[in-house]
Image (cartoon, rainbow, N blue to C red):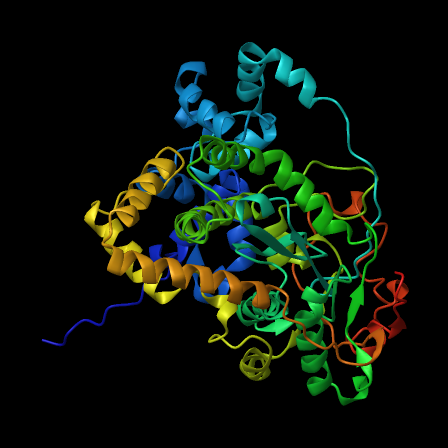
């Protein structure tokens, strides 16, 4: 008997879970509903090419299976959100409004309506609500041609009294935070160059130009950016592919620091100030400084990473005076073509990045060492003897004091070399902090680029934003092919 041949299934197949789940979770944490999740996934994955099918019903079923309930399904009330909101208020010193509280809760997969949070704030803290409504913002102007046209960066020294320093780098077009770091210095050009080079490695390229305040700590980034651009475009020889922004002209990082100070810093400052007031911690005592740093830097970096995720995945309020779409920074960063005729000016530089890192940010440099090796070995042994307790806000000073007691109880033969090593480390770090790097000579200009046009259908509200039609690219100064004519070289003055 002849075997009957089976016909292939003529119907489209469901999107495989290993592809669908990361995308659903990603857009769920953006706060998207099922329809918007479907639209976003359909843009990101070519369903027709793979003969896949996807619907809102499928997304609803998968969300239920993966325990991703919607706002309605979570059905929160005053009583159920109170513990979470109070924790956020405690950690931020009660500086967040209803929108920011929702953004923080969403990172914990707690979805609530804005009205519920507004009503809760009004009922629990009416005075604080009124204070947060006071308009203190000043209008500023910032221009950006497209994605990766410019990266801006800035340092933050407000935590000098604790022995900690912050640094941030942003992509100007999307307002996407590329890095947000804490370390024991932010004045060494090799350390700052490493932040830039690590971000470039993740993106697989560099921007057209970088910008910062005119501090010597930024000479490493200026040199690395200029060297890479010159290698990739010999016509830029004799130019500096970095611009110096004096005064408060470096707008995006200044705005970000204001947001960080308002929404994040105060809670941590109260915690650290408690230790100084109580006499537990003195930054001028080398051993105490190293112990504080060993505990605080990983803890703070973890929370900065969380704040960076919240910033990058939260939609800003719409501003009628802005021509840019009011969209989540991560969406503008990944899919700018959905929102208008925006081009990608990223300069591909993968092979050259490793050489630049060895030249401008060698990993064996002292600045990349958190604490001396001998101290790290002793403190790790003491920490393990405590049972490796979780270092967090509530336990920080208890763990610190127990470890400090452990150092005090060391035999003199072990304690004295540690104290001497800590004192010598303080001397070495003072030199590292003030390390100088010569700036490459060159006229500050921005070189032309080969821009990459983005595809994707315009957003629903696209026409309300820029007064430009998608086919009218040439009228914006772009060429059809996205070649060097689309962004001409122009001079950047030293007082820009």
Residue 465, horizontal then vertical, whole percent: 79, 45
Quadrant containing the N terminus is: bottom left
Q: Is residue 275 left or right of residue 103?
A: left
Query: Eyeballing the image, is 107 above or below 119?
Result: below
Q: Is residue 153 visible?
A: yes
User: Residue 301, relative to residue 320: is it above or below?
Assistant: below
Q: Residue 89 at x, y = what percent?
A: 51, 25
Q: For residue 112, say whether it is visible.
A: no
**Residue in the picture at 54% in, 36% down:** 269
Q: Position of residue 486 (x, y in %)?
A: 83, 72
The reply, left or right, for residue 305 in relation to residue 339 is left
Number of numbered discs on residues: 0
Q: Nearer the viewer, residue 294 or 121?
A: 294
Pick the residue in front: 121 or 7: 121
Q: Quadrant of the C terminus?
A: bottom right
| Residue pictured at 58% horizontal, 52% vertical | 165
Q: Is residue 284 left or right of residue 230?
A: left
Please name the residue shown 74% across and 62% down the image: 215
Task: Residue at 57%, 63% (x, y): give it.
Answer: 430
């Amino acid at each position: 008997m002849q075997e009957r041949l089976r016909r292939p299934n003529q119907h489209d197949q469901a999107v495989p879970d290993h592809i669908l789940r990361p995308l659903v979770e990603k857009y769920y944490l953006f706060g998207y509903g099922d329809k918007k999740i479907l639209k976003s996934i359909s843009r990101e994955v070519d369903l027709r090419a793979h003969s896949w099918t996807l619907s809102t019903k499928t997304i609803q079923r998968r969300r239920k299976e993966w325990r991703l309930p919607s706002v309605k399904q979570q059905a929160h009330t005053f009583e159920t959100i109170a513990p979470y909101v109070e924790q956020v208020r405690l950690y931020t010193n009660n500086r967040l409004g209803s929108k920011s509280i929702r953004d923080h809760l969403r990172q914990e997969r707690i979805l609530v309506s804005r009205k519920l949070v507004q009503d809760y704030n009004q009922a629990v803290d009416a005075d604080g609500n009124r204070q947060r409504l006071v308009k203190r913002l000043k209008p500023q102007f910032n221009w950006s041609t497209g994605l990766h046209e410019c990266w801006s960066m800035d340092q933050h020294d407000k935590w000098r009294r604790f022995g900690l320093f912050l640094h941030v780098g942003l992509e100007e077009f999307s307002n996407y935070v590329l890095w947000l770091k804490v370390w024991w210095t932010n004045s060494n050009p090799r350390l700052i160059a490493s932040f830039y080079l690590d971000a470039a490695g993740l993106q697989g390229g560099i921007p057209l130009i970088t910008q910062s305040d005119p501090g010597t700590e930024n000479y490493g980034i200026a040199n690395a950016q200029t060297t890479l651009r010159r290698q990739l475009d010999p016509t830029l020889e004799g130019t500096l592919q970095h611009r110096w922004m004096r005064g408060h002209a470096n707008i995006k990082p200044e705005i970000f620091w204001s947001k960080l100070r308002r929404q994040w810093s105060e809670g941590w400052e109260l915690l650290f100030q408690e230790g100084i007031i109580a006499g537990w911690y003195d930054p001028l005592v080398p051993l105490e400084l190293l112990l504080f740093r060993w505990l605080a830097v990983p803890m703070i970096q973890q929370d900065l990473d969380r704040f960076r995720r919240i910033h990058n995945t939260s939609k800003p309020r719409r501003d009628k005076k802005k021509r840019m779409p009011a969209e989540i920074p991560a969406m503008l960063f990944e899919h700018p073509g959905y929102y208008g005729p925006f081009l990608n000016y990223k300069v591909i530089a993968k092979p050259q990045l490793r050489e630049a890192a060895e030249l401008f940010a060698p990993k064996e440099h002292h600045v990349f060492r958190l604490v001396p090796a001998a101290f790290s070995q002793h403190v790790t042994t003491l920490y393990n003897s405590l049972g490796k307790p979780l270092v967090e806000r509530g336990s920080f000073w208890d763990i610190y004091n127990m470890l400090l007691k452990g150092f005090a109880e060391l035999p003199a033969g072990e304690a004295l070399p540690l104290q001497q090593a800590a004192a010598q480390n303080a001397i070495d770090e003072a030199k590292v902090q003030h390390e100088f790097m010569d700036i490459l000579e060159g006229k500050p200009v921005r070189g032309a680029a080969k821009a990459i046009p983005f595809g994707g259908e315009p957003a629903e509200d696209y026409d309300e934003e820029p007064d430009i039609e998608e086919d009218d690219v040439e009228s914006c100064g772009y060429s059809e092919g996205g070649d060097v004519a689309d962004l001409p070289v122009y001079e950047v003055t030293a007082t820009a």
